[in-house]
Image (cartoon, rainbow, N blue to C red):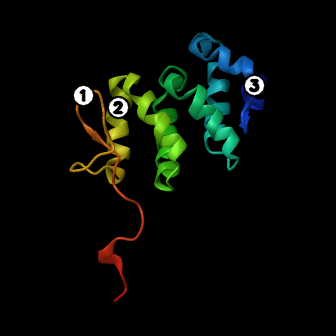
Amino acid sequence: MLQSIKQGGIRGKQVEGALGTWAREFLQYFTLRDQAAQIILKKMDDPDGGQRKYVANFLLGELPHILTEKYQRTRCLNILHEQLRTEDEYLESRLSSACNSWPTDWLDDLREVFVDLTDPDSPKMYLFDGTPFLGRQQGADPSDLPF
């Protein structure tokens, strides 16, 4: 199982690591859940987009059940923040559907970590509780111009 997740990736339309996708809802019950969590966090931070897409597509909704330690949640949200800061549209679309099933503690931390990427007046989406989420344009801040 862990080997399948390690090998998992998306290459074009081909998915590698199918066993890991099939068993994603059961990962929280595995005795080696911590090892699975470390593999997933490593994949999330991998420069290979296929690795990140695998997690975004198949595991994003299950992360709160797999990454059960506060430090794991913090690392996960910081990785997601960095990727969205660089405008990863695929991840953004997957996150917008997955995060509304996350528990309150995850959503509270999500709001806090993503405050700089959220435009409360023109959000891209709203969380299930009505909180604005995302929407702030990345790029140069006009107040930072050198002239």
Residue 129, label in figure: 1
The residues tagged by marks 3 and 1 sit, at their Cα atoms, a distance apart of 35 Å
Q: Amino acid at mark 1?
A: Asp
Q: Is residue 104 left or right of residue 36?
A: left
Q: Do the residues under discs 3 and 1 have CB atoms within 8 angstroms?
A: no
Residue at left offset 50%, top offset 51%:
82
Mark 3 secondary-structure assignment: loop
Q: Which mark is residue 17?
A: 3
At horizontal 47% and vertical 42% (from top left) the residue drawn is: 92
State the residue position of label 2. Answer: 107
Measure how far apart labels 2 and 1 are at the Cα level: 10 Å
- Give coordinates of residue 60: x percent, y percent: 53, 29
User: Label 2 is placed on what type of residue?
Assistant: Leu
x and y percent of residue 32 in the render? 67, 17
Quadrant in the rendering for residue 55: top right
**Residue in the foreground of this view, choosing between 34 and 50:** 50
Q: Does residue 117 appear in this view? A: yes
Query: Label 3 sits on what residue type?
Result: Gly
Q: Disc 2, disc 3: CB below 8 Å?
A: no
Residue 1 x, y percent position in the rendering: 74, 17
Query: Residues at badges 2 and 1 in contact (C-beta under 8 Å)?
Result: yes
Q: CA distance from mark 2 to mark 3?
A: 29 Å
Q: Secondary structure at mark 1?
A: loop
Tell which circle, 2 or 1, labels the residue nearer the N-terminal end: 2
